[in-house]
Image (cartoon, rainbow, N blue to C red):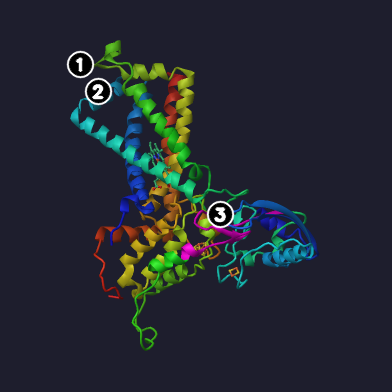
Amino acid sequence: MKTNFASSTLGRKFVMAITGLLLVGFLVAHLSGNFLLYQKEGSLFNAYAQKLASFGVLLYAAEVGLVAFFGFHAYNGIRLAFLKQRAKPVKYAVTQSKAGNSKWGLASNNMMVTGSVLLVFIVLHVIHFKYGRGLAEGYAVQVNNEEARDLHRLVVEEFKKPLITVLYTAVMVMLGFHLRHGIWSAFQTLGLTKENNSNKIYFVGGVLGVFLGFGFLTIPLYIYFFV
Amino acid sequence: MSNHAKSTKTSSKNMTVKLKVWRQKDAKTEGKFENYSLDGVSASMSFLEMMDLLNEDLTKKGIAPVEFQSDCREGICGTCSCFINGQAHGPERGAATCQVYMRKFAEGETIVIEPWRAAAFPIIRDLVIDRSPFDRIIAAGGYTGAKTGPHADANSILVPKPDADKAMDAAACIGCGACVAACPNSSASLFTSAKITHLAMLPQGHPLRERRVLRMVEQMDKEGFGHCTNIGECQSACPKEIKIDFIAQMRREYLAAVVNQRPESKSGGSG
Ligand code: HEM
Ligand code: SF4
Ligand code: FES
């Protein structure tokens, strides 16, 4: 029998779960790198940025991959959000969760909202830093006796602006919410949960999600208040 | 939680409740809420007995009674379906609408009663909805291939106890549709996964295992149910407490079937 895996509701969710988890993997790496910003002089962070840039084609390939994961994830998310609208066109006058083992909550009910914020954010974020001020504008520093981009200076200057810091912090709260439900959800979507591990995965997924959101959030605040 | 606290408040004496009930002439006409005040409700009445009382009252007043669905009134047929105060089958977990008692409600409380809301379950009238999409999902693959003829010996095919238990847990689904009603996406995943798991766990279900999951999932999508976002409100709403672990199993079954992609035999049968 011919199966339309890619457009079935289960297929779309498989794609979202795989791409979502790959993006989570990227976030873990990204956050690990960002923790170097806790060094006030910024030499470690600049050296790290320089090292990444030196990967050249490899870095480019990774970036293309990330954009693709992102695209597939967001595309299917948006398609499914439209399906939801069609499947439940009339809302109840009153709704309340029956609690118990339900995962009903702010995080699970607002995946599209938090996801959309992330979509807009990530475009702006890349413009903001990746394509922000660099060597051409005189943001240069010596790394291993070579001239490199002083990304640290740019980051610190930006996070000294209250509006930027507030916005980044707010978006990272959204990220925490997205992942609080998202990580568990991906495991459940991939069928990796069973009766004996489901609650544990929900717990650990939540902790990891909140840790990621919170971890990213501390950096702008640290720079704003302490650097 | 608050409901348990309430339960002690009401004595078995007569109480009055305020009802806000969805009235709708048919699928095409727009519906609206009507407010009724009902006296003489006893705490030991079931929710549906209270509805009967309301309908007697309305009939006497020359108002058309509120249409609602019920049959067994003991939680086994899956016919009753009221969305009560924002919850499918009302405040009690592990109970169908017909198993909810008025002692769960407080004297003078306003009770909002709505039909299941899902595009796939059109409203026929008032609280009556059309659940035939579930029948079509079952017809798409929710059966086993069995030889006709003399009755086979019981226990001629041995089933490991844990598998039998799991199949029984899944088979408890009464097809009420509360899972769809409670789901913000109107997903029928809990229902469909219960049916798929039930048969997948039994040797008799194996010959059609892959074909079954592919066909039933396809039918589920075709009927216009939404996708599952793993919110799990369905498992709290389910009167039979079917677990979303079955949804995870459905996905494993589906993935395995898609990967294998065996051509379907033209002659069909149980293989
Ligand atoms: C940093 C970026 C992101 C990460 C790490 C991420 C991660 C995840 C993960 C792991 C899931 C669970 C998948 C599943 O349920 O199987 C998920 C779900 C979801 N994501 Fe994202 N996501 C990100 C960005 C986005 C964006 C940009 C959008 C949107 C437009 C989006 C929309 C959604 C939606 C709507 C869901 C719920 C899917 C559903 O169950 O229907 N996400 N996300
Ligand atoms: S899974 Fe539960 S809620 Fe859904 S139809 Fe079956 S018995 Fe009703
Ligand atoms: S009337 Fe049969 S389950 Fe409620």
Decide if residue B221 is on the left or right side of residue B73.
left
Q: Secondary structure at mark 3?
A: loop
Q: What segment carries the magenta color?
A: B110-134
**Callout 2 crowding tier (Cα within 10 Å): few <14, some 14–19, many ≥20:** some
Q: Is mark 1 in CB contact (under 8 Å) with mark 2?
A: yes
Q: Secondary structure at mark 1?
A: strand
Placement of B156 over or under B249, stated as above or below: below
- State how far apart marks 1 and 2 are (Cα): 10 Å
Q: Secondary structure at mark 2?
A: helix
Circle 2: residue type: Gln
Disc ID at residue A146: 1
Identify the residue under disc 2. A50
- Foreground mark, 3 or 1? 3
* Ligand 2 contact, mark 3 (Cβ < 8 Å): no
Residue B269 seen in the figure: yes
Disc ID at residue B234: none
Identify the residue under disc 3. B117
**Callout 1 crowding tier (Cα within 10 Å): few <14, some 14–19, many ≥20:** few
